[in-house]
Image (spheres, rainbow, N blue to C red):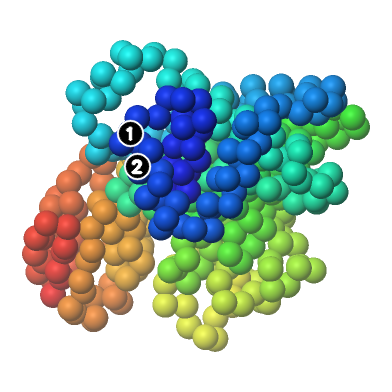
Amino acid sequence: MNEERVWFLLSIQLSGEATPKELEELNSLLKQHPEWELRAELMRNMWRSKRPSSPVAASHFDKHLQRLSNHLALPALQFDNETTESDPAETTTERRRNPLRWLWAATAAAACLVIFLLVYMPATKREAKPVASNTISTRPGSKSKVELPDGTQVWLNADSKLTYGQNFSGNTREVTLIGEAYFDVAHASSPETGKRIPFIIHTNSIDIKVLGTAFNVRSYPAEKTTETALIRGSVEITLHNSPDKKIVLKPDEKLIVKNDNAAVISTANNDSSAGWPDNEPVMTLSRIRPYKQDTTSHFETMWVKNKLAFENEAFDRMLPEIERWYNVTIVLKNESLNGLHFTGVFENKSLADVMEALSISRGFHYEIKGDRVTIW
């Protein structure tokens, strides 16, 4: 976020809209991160020299400027219960002083970036690798839904991050996911060939290729497994450690892959990936788990409906999910509880409600102090 803040402050400085307080903040951030100073100076020089004179470059400039100004003028993601540290009175005064201030800032930032890409980057490098990327993230205790430039709908679970390149709307649709997300992928076709453009998701252990479908991916760095649960359509999964192995999922199927290795596959009606023994397969193909009280819902995707759901879930796998859901830290002082399993659905329940239900059903004690929960 600091880097995004630097370019925003630089843009309003170039447009002449920065306040003394914002200029002071910009200088402070550049001192803290000297590696950004050179790029900032390049952008200042480019801004002074205005836009490219080449008709072709100018045409691309106008198109990219419109796209980027639209992207930067609106927040990519709203966090639940997010507050700002700026003074409300000061913010109101600034907006009254110049109601176009934020549009100027977005346009300036877009212009800086586009000039940098068109003038200073060699053409071959621009085609080979995106210079910049967009990152959408959620904090612990917060979930949100976003729409990608191609129309794909993405629900991000707590403490998750989605990254995609600036050329996302071209002939490549690739994203990188850390955490958990539910995708409803839009169909897209190449205007040149008419062929469908695949949508590819990269995680720390697998790549998922789709053409248009709905599915859930769970890939948190601290967890032992990566899960893909297919709701409709079809997906092709490639393992990083075994790129020659490709698994195609059918609707209502789920693939669980151990993050440290991937070579053997088995099938199962139900499973739990926590505490996976060494003699167990490192991949398991199973059916997704329907919720009996609502046939349109599955345990793997109930978080999208803001329901904290567990179905025969191991206790040590449940705790990190509760931590992310309520943005708390849980200290477990009774390791014997890790062998327990729990089934339950919580909708609009407080942390205290959840802990009370768990403690009654499994006979443990707990204490909540601020954002820290102790279990013994």
Front in this rendered view, residue 47 or 263:
47
Q: Nearer the viewer, residue 361 or 370?
A: 370
Q: Is residue 65 visible?
A: yes
Question: Which residue lies at the image location 43% right of the left edge and 69% below the top edge?
Answer: 222
Q: Is residue 49 left or right of residue 4?
A: right
* Mark 1 Cα-neighbour bin, 10 Å: few <14, some 14–19, many ≥20: few
What amino acid is labelled 1 in the image? Pro
User: Residue 324 is drawn in which quadrant?
Assistant: bottom left
Instruction: For the residues labelled 2 and 1, say whether their Cβ atoms are less than 8 Å apart.
Output: yes
Residue at x 38% of width, y 34% of height? 78
From mark 2 to mark 1, how far is it between C-alphas? 6 Å
User: Residue 173: x, y in percent?
Assistant: 70, 42
Q: Position of residue 240 (x, y in %)?
A: 69, 68
The residue shown at (63%, 56%) is 202
Q: Residue at x 85, y 49 (%)?
A: 124
Residue farthest to the bottom? Answer: 279
* Residue 255 seen from this side: no
Residue that carries the numbered disc 1 in the rendered image: 20
Horizontally, residue 359 falls left or right of residue 344, namely left
Q: Is residue 375 left or right of residue 310?
A: left
Write down the residue under mark 2: 24
| SS type, badge 2 | helix
Q: Amino acid at mark 2?
A: Glu
